[in-house]
Amino acid sequence: MRVVVPFGGDSPKTRLAPFLDADERRDFALAMLRDVLDTVEAAGGNPVVLADAPVEVDEQRSSAHQTMSGDVDVPVIVDDRPLTEAVNDQLGGDDPIAIVMADLALVTEAALTRLFETAGDVVAAPGLGGGTNALVVRTPDFRVDYHGASIADHRAIAADVGASFVEVDSMRLAVDIDESDDLVEVLLHSEGRAGEWVEAAGVELDTDGGRVTAIRRRR
Amino acid sequence: MRVVVPFGGDSPKTRLAPFLDADERRDFALAMLRDVLDTVEAAGGNPVVLADAPVEVDEQRSSAHQTMSGDVDVPVIVDDRPLTEAVNDQLGGDDPIAIVMADLALVTEAALTRLFETAGDVVAAPGLGGGTNALVVRTPDFRVDYHGASIADHRAIAADVGASFVEVDSMRLAVDIDESDDLVEVLLHSEGRAGEWVEAAGVELDTDGGRVTAIRRRR
């Protein structure tokens, strides 16, 4: 299955600004993107990056990945329109297609396999805060709308076109990484480059207070 | 399987204070507890409430539930020690036992069934922020420690006693309701009393900004 991975490469992850400077945010966003691309391939998908600016995804992919699937380039489509328009331009064909966000740092092969194998005209993995972090679309009539509480909008859009809508219950697909608190999840649950990158950047768990938080002791 | 549901009935959900007053927080906490108890029973478990103060759980349980299983009282054990000690006092027996938190407002029968049916000496559903929202324990040697990033501690404790440790990947078990932002998830995903309670209290989604938030327009 073709798996479109939207990537905001222009100024990624601005809400991590208190923690990471602009170059670091870009590096970290690329680490997450590469984790997602490898995991899509491991789950049997054919990834395509849909970026709002040119991006070089292949230079640092893992040796494990290269051993597994050779040195295959992942195609990059550059489309600088807003996310919803760019994704809708990819929909409407007869073949099933998936949309998987690039900042799912906790993604696992098992979670994506479950997403890809769940039956339904539209299969969605809700994100925290009302988002739709991953979709499989098996009908040409469905369109996305990522503004606002998109999971509720996507339920309604599917109903409007008479398509079944099935949700996949996954924490690893629900957590996208936008804010410093989300780095707690990366430190605890990432199995890829994203976790390594955050640790190397000096970000650590702080368990002293009532809540677990992420802190950065050194730069 | 015996399913222990710890409930902080003394002054529940204090971090919801900006949104809900003390009586409301208690009502809402009871609505979530009742959803969890019904869902445990639907998934084939035998729930027991482990409370730090006396609590009346049965008066408002659903008629659907009463039709299904009769007017069965859920036993309440009152233990005013800290959570970790009170739960550990329930462990150590030869029969499998589960621990499911009372504030999992998004819980579904499917998610709990998956938890209960996953093989492993210790099966855990991680919570956001490093918590351990649900556990199945099939070895008498395991003990809990809910302080700090408990999911990491529980992995280590299982390894120390030579027990296998398996994680269940579920958003519906990962989200516990502590803060006003969490009410977004209740409004979007609850299938029980908790969602009805929050709507009746006048809490609504606000999708005007970049993030979806919960607001309370009326009291």
Image (cartoon, coloured by chain):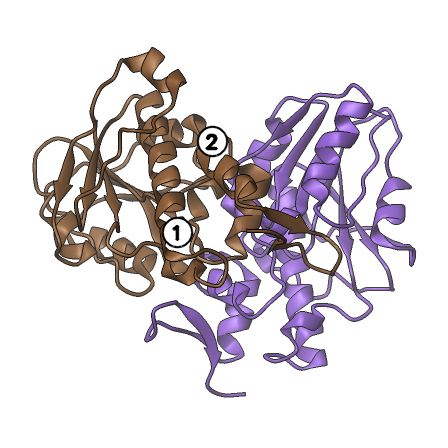
Chain colours: A brown, B purple
Label 1 is found on which chain of the structure?
A
Vertical arrangement, residue B14 with respect to residue B48, above or below: below
* Residue A192 - label: 2
The mark that comes first in sequence, 2 or 1, is: 1
Q: Is residue B203 visible?
A: no
Q: What percent of the width, then of the height, locates residue B149?
A: 70, 46
Q: What percent of the width, then of the height, locates residue B62?
A: 61, 59
Extreme-bottom residue of the structure? B218
Quarter the N terminus of chain A occupies: top left
Q: Residue at x 24, y 45 (%)?
A: A6
In this image, A176 relative to B208: left or right?
right
Residue B182 image-quadrant placement: bottom right
In this image, B215 relative to B130: left or right?
left
Callout 2 crowding tier (Cα within 10 Å): few <14, some 14–19, many ≥20: many
Q: Amino acid at mark 1?
A: Arg
Q: Is residue A87 visible?
A: yes
Q: Nearer the viewer, residue A219 or B66?
A: A219
Residue A57 image-quadrant placement: top left
- Element at badge 1? helix
Question: Do discs 2 and 1 belong to a common subunit?
Answer: yes
How much space separates mark 2 and mark 1, taking CA atoms? 17 Å
- Element at badge 2? loop
Instruction: Please name which of the two marks, 2 or 1, marks the residue nearer to the observer.
Output: 1
Q: Which residue is mark 1?
A: A25
Q: Residue at x 26, y 54 (%)?
A: A154
Q: Residue at x 84, y 47 (%)?
A: B84
Disc 2 to disc 1: CB gap under 8 Å: no
Q: Amino acid at mark 2?
A: Gly
